[in-house]
Image: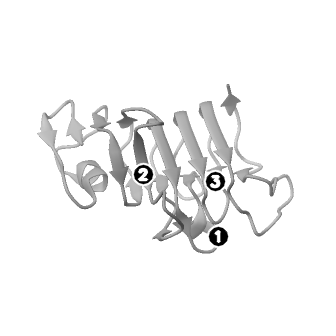
Amino acid sequence: VFNEDTSETFDGTNAIQNAVDDSDTTSGDTLRVGPGTYDESVTIDVENLTLEGASVDATTIGDPSGLSLSGPIVRINAADVEVDGFEITGADGDNEAGQGVDVNGDEHNTDGVTLRNLEVRNNNDRGLVVDYTDNATIENVTVEDNYDRDTFSGDPSEDGFGTSDDADGITLY
């Protein structure tokens, strides 16, 4: 993982999370994630951060061999975050622990989030959840083969995309 703005490189276990958590990573930075499988869960709490994979076919966050990680695999807790170019897979557990991507606007300002060029699959709960978030953009995102045990009002159980009543201005491409 390479921070384009600080020129720092992060390798090894939890490389993506370590890059996000690094004290030099600040608003406006871009983290480039090289090809490979990153067997970890990532929480992004840096506003205006871009997390960019090599491509959906080349960069995986999670465990493609099966359900083994406590998720969500990617949790976004900040505004204006962009996540682009990943397969996100393998979350195990109930409710949030089984989610692939959670835009956590219920507890944080996550307005203006952009999710682009993602494949979110094989998670034990909903693949993609966008809660209490305004002006989110979801472009070229495939959400499939996720299992949602609960069906909520307005929340489709098949493949698992969920949103709350208080999410406005979500644009799907």
**Which residue position holds label 3?**
127
The answer to which of 173 and 87 lies nearer the viewer is 87
In this view, 40 is above or below 141: below
Q: Can residue 39 be seen in the rendering of this structure?
A: yes
Q: CA distance from mark 2 to mark 3?
A: 13 Å
Mark 1, secondary structure of its residue? helix
Image spot of residue 145 (x, y percent) = 69, 53
Q: Earlier in the sequence, mark 1 or mark 2?
A: 2
**Which residue position holds label 1?**
95
Mark 2 is surrounded, within 10 Å at the Cα level, by few (under 14), some (14 to 19) or many (20 or more) other residues, namely many
Q: Residue at x 83, y 62 (%)?
A: 152
Q: Can residue 80 be seen in the rendering of this structure?
A: no
Q: CA distance from mark 1 to mark 2?
A: 19 Å
User: Which quadrant would the C terminus be assigned to in this image?
Assistant: top right
The answer to which of 131 and 57 lies nearer the viewer is 57
Q: Quadrant of residue 58?
A: top left
Q: Which mark is residue 61?
A: 2
Q: Amino acid at mark 2?
A: Ile
Residue 15 in the figure: left or right of residue 119: left
User: Which quadrant would the N terminus be assigned to in this image?
Assistant: top left
Q: CA distance from mark 3 to mark 1?
A: 11 Å
- Check whether the beta carbons of the residues at disc 1 and disc 2 lie within 8 A of each other: no
Q: Amino acid at mark 1?
A: Asn
Q: Residue at x 55, y 70 (%)?
A: 92
In this rendering, which labeled residue sits more in front, label 1 or label 2? 2
Mark 3, secondary structure of its residue? loop
